[in-house]
Amino acid sequence: MRVTGTGHASMRIDTAAGSILCDPWVNPAYFASWFPFPDNSQLDWEALGDVDYLYVSHLHRDHFDAAHLKRYVSKSATVLLPEFPTSEMEDEFRELGFTKFLKTRNEEVVELDGGLKIMIQALTSPTDGPIGDSSLWVEYDGVRLLNQNDARPTDLTVFAELGHVHAHLLQFSGAIWYPMVYELPNAAKTAFGKQKRDRQFDRTWRYIDDLKADHVFPIAGPPCFLDDELWQFNDIFGDEGNIFPDQSVFLAEYAKVGGTNGIVLLPGSVAEVTTSGATTRHPVPVEEFFANKVAHLEEMRERKRPIIAAEKASWRHPEVDVLKELKRRIEPLLDESIYLAKGVGGPVRFDLVGYDDESVESIVVDFPGKQVRPYADEKVRYRFRTERALVEHLLHIGEVDWVNSLFLSCRFSAARIGQYNEFVYAFFKCLSTERLQYAEGWYDEHERAVDAEDITLGDWVVQRRCPHLKADLSRFGIVDGDQLTCQLHGWRFDLPSGRCLTSVGHKVRAHRVGEEAPVPQAAQPAN
């Protein structure tokens, strides 16, 4: 099996029975904030796009690059569709001219022509990607590969049970806006960033240990930031709190925990994977490339300046009445929302900075009041500050996912009182009736589900599944004193009280070994 690195989470998998192109991303994403690193725009995409099959894990813009898919990927390719809860992905592909689809069933192996086998595991929580994420398992002639990209399954058992995996490709770096955009003292940002960076690696080591593949390939990050306004987010300043470590850092950290089977794929690298080993050839030596990382980024920044300038010029839409359009689009969704609105629990404020960089219009999305209105000088738990032009553009194009556009751009600042609230971001990625109804149904189902199974961790008996996204705490749970940490997403819980220390709206069931379990309170119906 041949694996060609094509940048970020993208790769081309070639076998004698067919070829699969995965997640090709080349054009800048998220308001021209993210670019693939290393640069992959100069690869021979005409040749790379001439494939039998196309797999895109989910609709995040650093995986689903519509302009690139339309121009470079053969429309005779069969699209391998994960079993997602909505038709959005298929609809997007059809708009680009694709007509051949294989609609997979979740975690079911499909044998394609010539003995090529694939299986897709779809994750369908509202917090997974825009409306889901997925991983691709491939087998041909006894060689097995898992492309986990940046999916976060609670368990890799389903893949391990299909046979020993020879190549495991997975995320290790950051892909979020926290803590950089928060209005915090620099020392606090560094401390929180270091915690997140450490958790990212801990989660990666856990996945690697679970699967025990012959070879581990770090992929799906980091992006690079070429706009002068965002340049400081690149991990080139010796900042231990930077959440975007690169592949060379992965190899160094992996070695500290005994890892010796890591393989880096640069754009254009080719790995030949067999049941007995892997050989790799690179366009330039990996060590040499990362030794010259700053020069690579600086050259890339100069070359991409016209692209960034053109993007910025397209954002302003002064004809858009932002307050009026927000009311028209969001108020009907607030009326429909039960679980998300209750989860947010208060007003969320947006401060929109005008074209002059001085004037500010403050607008509140009032979840309890079910309305969008001017800010009335009240206390809010969440506040976002961004350019008015960005919100104008979102409204102009009818964007249904502000997480997969504004927030991932890092072109905003944020402040909050109290804990992280996942419902705020879940709502702003569900700005369509179809998405909102799905998310409401998902939370309704999980709100009513009873997790009766307990496990013992250290001196504590706790429920087996994390209250956040049902991760198996027998695999991901770590107890330190009276605190439990779920390493899948880094959520922490105070065990004596059960209270979540990371976000609102979640509680873990727990009691000390040898003590009697508390009597659960009767469940209260949602209102």
Image (tube, rainbow, N blue to C red):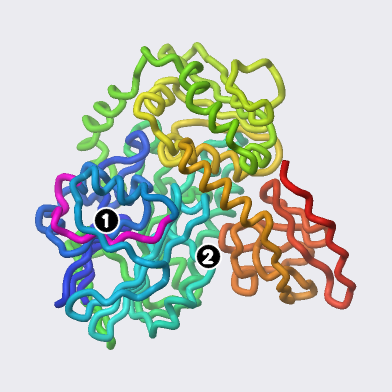
The image position of residue 305, as x and y in percent, is: 24, 32
Q: In the picture shown, does residue 426 fall above or below 115?
A: above
The residue located at (34%, 45%) in the rendering is 61
Residue type beneath disc 2: Arg
Q: In the picture shown, does residue 375 fall above or below 186?
A: above
> SS for tag 1?
loop
| Stretch of the chain drawn in magenta | 70-84
Q: In the picture shown, does residue 391 fall above or below 217?
A: above
The front one of 183 and 15 is 15
Regarding residue 2, the answer to whether it shows in the image is yes
- In the picture, which quadrant includes the C terminus? top right
- CA separation, marks 2 and 1? 22 Å
- Mark drawn on residue 512: none
Where is mark 2, residue-wise?
Answer: 203
Where is mark 1, residue-wise?
Answer: 7
Left or right, residue 146 beside residue 455:
left
Residue 298 inside the magenta-drawn segment: no
The residue located at (70%, 46%) in the rendering is 504
The image position of residue 212, as x and y in percent, is: 44, 80
- Of callouts 2 and 1, the N-terminal one: 1
